[in-house]
């Protein structure tokens, strides 16, 4: 099978490349060298490459910037996906799209499954939902995976890196207690995506690791694993951060459709988090100061 992966150097894209290649598939990975917002180029290049599957892991994930300047988010997250969907339709190629827990408004009070009605609050999430609907309207063979709170080895920024960087730099941290979700390890998600795609069971899936927590608990667990028990962790509420993008209160996802279709559950996030933090500290040169790109107020997407 020949697989095109757009956004191949991103946090998830990197793991998708590894997983699909590891499973013996031919992978063609692209980033800005195949700008998904360039309709002419996408429509020319995709049919030439004759893929059996196209995965759109490319995105503009800067939620706060999207509130202040929405057009780049519209262009990449909606129009880029539209361009790829049209090219897939013309080529007869199934397509994978990555969406977000933020399509929900967070008021349900328990985990959201695929039967719950979305009600996105911010620009980024509205683009993602619009892109989902577009794909469903033009393609018969699509896989949509809504995921959340990704952490992975590739990329400069994610919540865990920000927590460790800020803890190391400042010795104390303020983290929100009123944002609840389902952390997801990029490598585990890539494995699930591969499994579902290989099955040919098209549709909409929630796909996150097991386990629900607040950002505060997520940070607490990270510091425990790191063994940094001298760090002061202060609970705050989201409003105190003054960020432009509204964060829904509780967007934990329930992977109901994965269960209904007979796929094995993803493991509890505690397990990959431990592996990941240990990897960051021991192998990734984190403590040598090579990682410098986090911001103090970064609560990530
Ligand atoms: N991260 C999360 O917590 C989270 C949560 C829910 C859903 N998701 C979704 O999961 C997917 C993967 O997220 P991620 O964290 O892996 O994202 P990421 O690390 O930001 O990777 C996105 C990739 O897309 C590339 N890209 C951006 N604009 C492009 C364009 N116009 N043409 C081609 N490539 C472009 C980026 O390149 P540059 O580096 O050059 O910009 C980057 O390599 C995304 O769809 C995201 O919306 C993520």
Image (tube, rainbow, N blue to C red):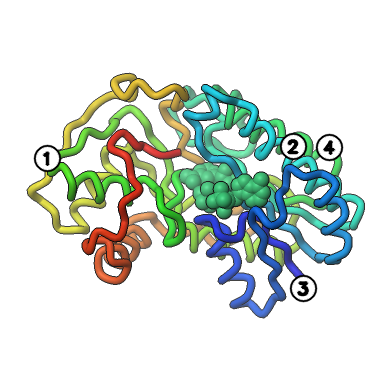
Q: What's the CA distance linking mark 1 and mark 4?
A: 50 Å
Q: Earlier in the sequence, mark 3 or mark 1?
A: 3
Q: Residue 232's mark?
A: 1
Secondary structure beneath label 4: helix
The residue pinned by badge 4 equals 137
State the residue in front, 231 or 76: 76
| Front label number (2 vs 4) | 2
Look at 32% across and 67% down and name the residue there.
284
The residue pinned by badge 2 equals 79
Q: Residue 97's mark?
A: none
Please determine whether, in this image, residue 296 is positioned above or below residue 286. Answer: above
The residue pinned by badge 3 equals 1
Q: What's the CA distance linking mark 3 and mark 1?
A: 50 Å
Q: Earlier in the sequence, mark 2 or mark 4?
A: 2
Q: Which of marks 2 and 1 is nearer the N terminus?
A: 2
State the residue in front, 194 or 172: 172
Q: Is residue 145 left or right of residue 107?
A: right
Whole-percent x, y for residue 17 in the image: 60, 67
Secondary structure beneath label 3: loop
- Residue neighbourhood size for the residue with mark 4, other residues' Cα within 10 Å, grouped as few (<14), some (14–19), many (≥20): few
Q: What's the CA distance linking mark 2 and mark 1?
A: 43 Å
């Amino acid at each position: 099978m020949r697989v095109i992966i757009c956004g191949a150097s991103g946090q998830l894209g990197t793991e998708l490349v590894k997983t699909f290649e590891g499973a013996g598939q031919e992978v063609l990975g692209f980033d800005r060298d195949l700008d998904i917002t360039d309709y002419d180029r996408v429509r020319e290049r995709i049919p030439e490459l004759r893929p059996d599957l196209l995965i759109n892991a490319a995105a503009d994930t800067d939620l706060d910037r999207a509130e202040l300047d929405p057009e780049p988010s519209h262009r990449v997250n909606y129009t880029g996906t539209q361009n790829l969907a049209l090219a897939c339709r013309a080529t007869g190629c199934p397509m994978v799209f990555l969406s977000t827990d933020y399509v929900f408004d967070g008021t349900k009070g328990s985990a959201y499954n695929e039967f719950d009605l979305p009600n996105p609050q911010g620009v980024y999430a509205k683009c993602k939902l619009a892109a989902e609907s577009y794909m469903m309207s033009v393609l018969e063979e699509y896989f949509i995976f809504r995921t959340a709170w990704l952490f992975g080895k590739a990329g400069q920024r994610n919540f865990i890196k920000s927590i460790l960087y800020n803890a190391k730099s400042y010795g104390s941290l303020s983290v929100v207690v009123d944002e609840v979700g389902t952390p997801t390890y990029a490598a585990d998600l890539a494995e699930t995506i591969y499994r579902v795609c290989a099955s040919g069971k098209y549709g909409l899936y929630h796909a996150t690791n097991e386990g629900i927590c607040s950002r505060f608990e997520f940070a607490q667990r990270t510091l425990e694993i790191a063994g940094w028990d001298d760090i002061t962790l202060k609970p705050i509420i989201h409003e105190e951060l003054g960020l432009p993008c509204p964060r829904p209160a509780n967007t934990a996802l329930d992977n109901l459709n994965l269960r209904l279709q007979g796929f094995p559950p993803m493991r509890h996030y505690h397990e990959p988090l431990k592996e990941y933090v240990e990897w960051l500290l021991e192998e990734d040169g984190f403590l040598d100061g090579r990682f410098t790109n986090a911001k103090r107020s970064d609560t990530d997407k």
